[in-house]
Image (cartoon, rainbow, N blue to C red):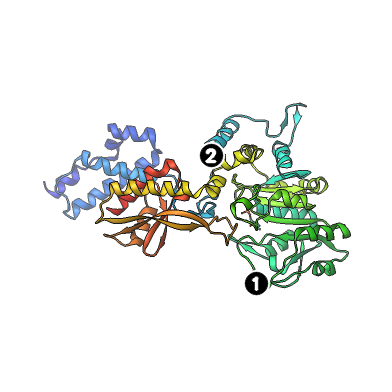
Amino acid sequence: MTKQKLLASLPSVDEILKSGKGLEWQESYPRRYVLQAIREIIEQTRQAILKDEIKEISLEDMLPHVQHRIERLSVFSLRPVINATGVVMHTNLGRSVLSEEILENVKKVACGYSNLEYDLEKGERGKRYSHIQRLLNEITGAESSLIVNNNAAAVFVCLTALAKGKEVIVSRGELVEIGGSFRVPDVMSASGAILREVGTTNKTHLRDYESAINENTGLLLKVHQSNFRTIGFTKQVEIEGMTTLGKKHNIPVMFDLGSGCLIDLKPYGVHIEPTVQEIVKSGCDIVTFSGDKLLGGPQGGVIVGKSELIEKIAKNPLMRAVRIDKLTLSAFEAVLMNYLDEDKAKVNIPTVRMLLQDVNEIKARAKKISMRLKREIKEDVAEMDVIEDSSQSGGGALPEIEFKTFAVAVKPKKLSVNRLEERLRHGNPPIIARIKDNALIIDARTIGDNEVEALVKGIEGALL
Ligand SMILES: *Cc1c(COP(=O)(O)O)cnc(C)c1O
């Protein structure tokens, strides 16, 4: 056929739209993406004709290209990935993982109306915070509690409500920066509180706090060092010392605990992470922590402490700007319900389960993945071995603790390991893994049993 004839025989947008496939697409995809894809593929075909790259055209041949293009356009931007890094609370990969059971509760609350701010007993306006106050108080032992959007907001609103225009005494060893631009001195100045640094980078004593106290002191603040440690010739003041000092001078003591661990980790070999319960018991007046770090819930910032101070914080106008929504609130209630029995939390909260799971379980999963891979992939394509390795908790928590883990090391033979990593990242679903010693490491700790098939398929496809 001549070029002219070929061009004349190109189908119109309308023709494709009205074809069987065209009608099907309009049912399942946004119409504007269907149109865009059709136009692009027609144009692409026109260019190919002009360049003499094709000698004939048929609608049948064009439809799969349109379909592929529509699928590419309609893919969700925020979507699931397989976390093969072994980092349980991976901030870039969404931190904590919620279970189906927890989401069931969210679904019930979110797909209809709820008593979010309605007191069913009295038949009048209620408070959204009331729904989890009882649980939080019971679990942490605190008098009262509040919950906001995240821990950064919790710290900010507490500082504003309790210490605006007043001095807040902090140890120089605790003026930390957490990822994503949360820096204690910056948060402090934004809140209107005046930072009063005491001690040195490596050592701060109780007497340093005491001699800094004056009539304009609003708060003694302790900050969890989170993602770093000072080692060697060091000293930070324990919370007990600070609460005693606070009581003596009638100044409230606040602890930004970062992770907010509710389970004693000592039986798991972690001796440096205090529980929220211990900190509350020490007499600390206000404790703040994240909902989606060690606690394993949705993004949120929990504030627990003395009723009088909590009331003051609750009344601050900022609370409206950092208020938590009903989806998060219902997820939190379901997560916290599990903490009433610690054993349930260890099984039912995915983040906690992945962190504390028995290493033999991880080993068995790594072996299963490796066996499935070996069945699908020939030895001249890639070498696969189960190796012992270590994973980190992530989420700025427990930085120096290495959790023993098992992984599958994949050594591709027909492409570079970097190329393999990239292909997996671009896959569907994307698989995120790390490279070590020229092998791709698939850490079995963070792979769900229901993800093994997709993982094997993804790796198999990427190696071709
Ligand atoms: C993580 C962390 C924060 C910030 O918490 P988000 O919930 O991420 O806002 C604040 N302080 C400390 C000590 C932390 O570890």
Picture quadrant of ligand 1: bottom right
The type of residue carrying mark 1 is: Gly
Q: Where residue 249 appears, x then y in whole percent? A: 88, 60
Depth check: 126 or 138 in front? Answer: 138
Mark 1 or mark 2: whose residue is earlier in sequence: 2
Q: Which numbered disc, 1 or 2, marks the residue closer to the eye?
A: 1
Horizontal side, residue 149 vs residue 192: left or right: left
Asked if 79 appears above or below 405 in the picture, the reply is above
Label 2: how many residues lie within 10 Å, few (<14), some (14-19) or many (20+)?
some
Depth check: 112 or 236 in front? Answer: 236
Q: Where residue 253 appears, x then y in whole percent? A: 79, 57
Instruction: Give the residue at mark 1.
Output: 232
Alpha carbon distance from label 1 to label 2: 41 Å
Residue 191 visible in the picture = yes
Residue drawn where x is 21% and y is 52% of the image:
48
Residue 78 visible in the picture = no
Classify residue 237 by image quadrant. Answer: bottom right
Q: Where residue 275 appears, x then y in whole percent? A: 68, 51
- Kindly tell me whether mark 2's CB lies below 8 Å from ligand 1: no
Residue drawn where x is 77% and y is 61% of the image:
193
Q: Where residue 303 appears, x then y in whole percent? A: 72, 48
Depth check: 211 or 110 in front? Answer: 211
Residue drawn where x is 62% and y is 37% of the image:
334
Depth check: 75 or 380 in front? Answer: 380
The type of residue carrying mark 2 is: Ser
Horizontal side, residue 29 vs residue 358: left or right: left
**Label number found at residue 178:** none
Instruction: Give the residue at mark 2.
Output: 99
Helix, strand or loop at mark 1 = loop
State the count of labels. 2
Looking at the image, the residue that sits furthest to the left is: 1
